[in-house]
């Protein structure tokens, strides 16, 4: 009876913890197996503890090359998509122009369309244009599909911004450039940052579109896929774990900084 | 406080108007705000008062006409080049900056030195010294409002524009901030142009009030002058309450005699609109607090020479300092009377027959061609 009651009272917490476990468990498995020393080429069964892979993360041929390529593409795609997406979001919210409605709905198309279809049509486009497949085609494709996510994130933020803030800035002797830099941009920053993070993550782990349009270039997801045919090096788990830890650390530091700033202003 | 040119002068609007497509928000209007005065633009929402203010600030482009400041035409200047600052209705404080940086914003844009001292000085003036490092969302409404005032005032503008600055505050706080703003204005001596829909606020604070209605200035004058001598029914009803009685002129002269509701009323000829030929029609007005009530059963209820109207009380409501009566009479369906609660009055319950009497000198008259109910605030307006 009592058990039932406490269960009922804590149902939300229990459901939350179970969901969290579901989300974190795969990451835990990846981490655990990054310390494995497998027999043979496949890292699917636990043998014994070892730090070998952590000591030599680039020990597998081409792994670090593909990783750095993916990071470079992700950084550039994020930059491009964020700059373009922010401008589009502002245009859509702040200005009335012809075809605004069309742009507004078309921008969501890449999110809605099956990725494999988009990948194939992009490839057709590039081939017809006679473009050489490689770094550049991948980058263009990534900017294209990241754009809609950035626009969505920034638009939500800009919609909630009070246009009077910019009027106040202009009233207080800030010219158009100053107003944008001192008021508009800082207030829109959380939306822009969210869009940029999303773009980075999407670009970094994209496989389908990249695989179609990369030519002979090999990004990190393509490398993992390729090597999985022949065996899974432990180093893949090492890189995965490192990415996970870095991401969590970034979030934690961000929250700490925000929390401290809030405390400071309260004094 | 005298680093800037505070001698500058009057704000002069000449034939200024604003149209959005086919809708005219402000009809061509001329207005002069004397240097150093506290000027209020009063009107219901949508009357064009805020648009007028925004044209002075440069946030709205005038369709016609010019804005000049101390003799300099500033019509073509963008807002950041005008020596004018605004306190916005929603305050529009920058959420990403703390109180100090909000206040310092204007100084920093103009690369003024000694920002720290001047911000400290300004925080002192608005009594917010302890809140310098807070963010706007950590402040109460009243505090935010004072930050908004400080942020504008620190620039020593030639004119401070206030757009319904007290609208978001509760009644008590609003009263306090009214006095506070008035004190600050007297202290710094800057011209204030204040937009409000609250007639009490305008009358408490301003030296001169311009009553606006449907994009036009109805009447301009000191609060007492507007209250005592309204020239239109809109002003008579919008500022306080007026009893308006339809009447026909019997004889004109220094004293005008009119007949209304079967009786005669007298009023000074100087308080009538220009032509008063016998047989013409007038709207005779009297403020509710100028009327005295006496039970009809009293033998000699009113002294000679006073205007008298008989009627029956239909409603009475006690509101502390006074009691408000509604009286039905041949002269008007619902005449309002406010009686001071000096002593308990007998025979003034709803249903009793009464005599209303007042000094003829307190009577004013308006052109009868106007809508009698213009400017009467409905329930939604008052909210």
Image: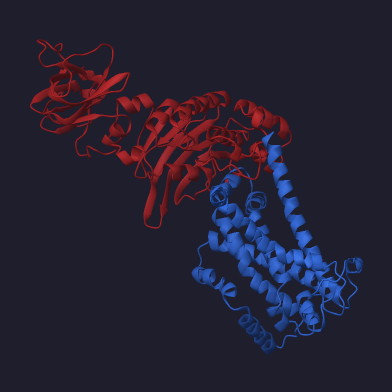
Chain colours: A blue, B red
Instruction: Compare residues A57 and B218 and report the one nearer the observer.
Output: A57
Front residue of this view, candidates A201 and B287: A201
Quarter of image, res A220: bottom right
Residue at the left extreme?
A: B262
Horizontal arrangement in the rendering, residue B326 relative to residue B153 (left or right) = left
Report if residue B372 is visible in the image. yes
| Residue B144 in the image: above or below residue A199 | above
Measured as percent of width and height from the top left, residue A98 is found at 50, 69
- Residue B249: percent from left, percent from top: 13, 29
**Residue at (11% x, 10% y) in the render:** B300
Left/right placement of residue B382 relative to residue B13 reads: left
Q: Is residue A235 above or below residue A251?
A: below
**Quadrant in which the C terminus of chain B is drawn:** top left
Foreground of the two, B336 or B33: B336
How many numbered discs?
Answer: 0
Q: Position of residue B334 (x, y in %)?
A: 18, 30
Residue A98 in sight here: no
Q: Quadrant of the N terminus of chain B?
A: top right
Q: Residue at x 73, y 78 (%)?
A: A138
Determine whether A195 is above or below B364 in the image: below
Residue nearer the viewer, B149 or B230: B149
Q: Position of residue B374 (x, y in %)?
A: 27, 39
Q: Which residue is depicted at the point 61% across and 42% down? A: A172
Residue B222: quarter of image: top left
Task: Judge left or right: residue A183 versus residue B240.
Answer: right
Q: Toward which corner of the image does residue B224 lie, by quadrant? A: top left
């Amino acid at each position: 009876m009592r058990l039932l009651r406490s269960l009922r009272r804590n149902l939300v917490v229990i459901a939350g913890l179970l969901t969290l476990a579901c989300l974190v468990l795969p990451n835990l498995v990846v981490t655990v197996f990054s310390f494995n020393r497998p027999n043979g080429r496949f890292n699917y069964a636990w043998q014994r503890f070892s730090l070998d892979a952590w000591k030599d993360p680039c020990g597998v041929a081409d792994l670090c090359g593909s990783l750095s390529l993916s990071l470079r593409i992700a950084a550039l795609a994020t930059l491009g998509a964020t700059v373009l997406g922010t401008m589009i979001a502002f245009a859509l919210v702040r200005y009335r122009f012809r075809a605004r409605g069309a742009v507004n709905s078309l921008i969501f198309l890449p999110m809605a369309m099956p990725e494999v279809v988009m990948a194939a049509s992009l490839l057709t486009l590039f081939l017809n244009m006679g473009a050489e497949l490689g770094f550049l085609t991948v980058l263009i494709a990534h900017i294209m599909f990241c754009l809609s996510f950035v626009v969505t994130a920034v638009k939500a933020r800009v919609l909630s911004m009070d246009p009077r803030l910019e009027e106040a800035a202009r009233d207080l002797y800030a010219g158009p450039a100053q107003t944008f830099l001192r008021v508009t941009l800082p207030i829109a920053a959380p939306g822009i940052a969210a869009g940029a993070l999303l773009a980075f993550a999407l670009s970094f782990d994209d496989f389908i579109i990249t695989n179609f349009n990369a030519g002979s270039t090999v990004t990190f997801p393509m490398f993992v896929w390729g090597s999985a045919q022949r065996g899974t090096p432990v180093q893949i788990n090492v890189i995965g774990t490192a990415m996970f830890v870095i991401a969590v650390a970034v979030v934690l530091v961000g929250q700490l900084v925000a929390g401290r700033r809030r405390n400071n202003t309260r004094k | 406080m005298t680093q800037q040119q505070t001698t500058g002068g009057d704000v002069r609007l000449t034939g200024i108007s604003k149209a959005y497509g086919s809708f005219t928000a402000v009809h061509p209007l001329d207005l002069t705000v004397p240097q150093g005065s506290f000027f209020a633009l009063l009107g219901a929402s949508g009357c064009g008062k805020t648009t007028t203010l925004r044209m002075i600030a440069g946030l709205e482009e005038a369709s016609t006409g010019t804005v000049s400041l101390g003799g300099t035409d500033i019509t073509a200047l963008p807002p950041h080049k005008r020596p004018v600052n605004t306190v916005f209705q929603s305050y529009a404080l920058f959420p990403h900056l703390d109180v100090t940086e909000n206040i310092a914003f204007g100084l920093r844009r103009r690369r003024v030195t000694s920002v720290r001292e001047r911000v400290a000085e300004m925080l002192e003036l608005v009594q917010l010294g302890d809140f310098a490092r807070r963010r706007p969302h950590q402040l109460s409404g009243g505090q935010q409002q004072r930050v908004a005032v400080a942020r504008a005032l620190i620039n020593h503008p030639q004119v401070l524009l206030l757009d319904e600055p007290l609208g978001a505050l509760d009644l008590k706080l609003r009263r306090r901030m009214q006095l506070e703003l008035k004190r600050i204005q007297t202290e710094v001596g800057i011209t204030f142009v204040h937009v409000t829909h609250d007639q009490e606020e305008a009358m408490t604070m301003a030296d001169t009030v311009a009553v606006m209605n449907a994009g036009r200035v109805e009447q301009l004058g000191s609060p007492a002058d507007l209250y005592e001598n309204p020239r239109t029914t809109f002003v008579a009803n919008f500022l306080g309450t007026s009893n308006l009685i339809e009447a026909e002129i019997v004889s004109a002269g220094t004293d005008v005699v009119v007949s209304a509701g079967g009786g005669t009323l007298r009023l000074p000829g100087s308080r009538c609109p220009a032509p008063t030929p016998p047989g013409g029609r007038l709207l005779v007005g009297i403020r509710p607090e100028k009327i005295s009530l006496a039970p009809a059963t009293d033998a000699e209820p009113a002294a000679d020479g006073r205007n008298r109207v008989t009627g029956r009380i239909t409603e009475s409501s006690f509101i502390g300092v006074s009691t408000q009566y509604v009286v039905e009479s041949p002269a008007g369906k619902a005449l309002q009377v406010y009686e001071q609660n000096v002593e308990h009055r007998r025979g003034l319950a709803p249903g009793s027959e009464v005599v209303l009497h007042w000094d003829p000198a307190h009577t004013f008259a308006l052109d009868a061609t106007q809508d009698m109910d213009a400017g009467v605030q409905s329930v939604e307006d008052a909210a």
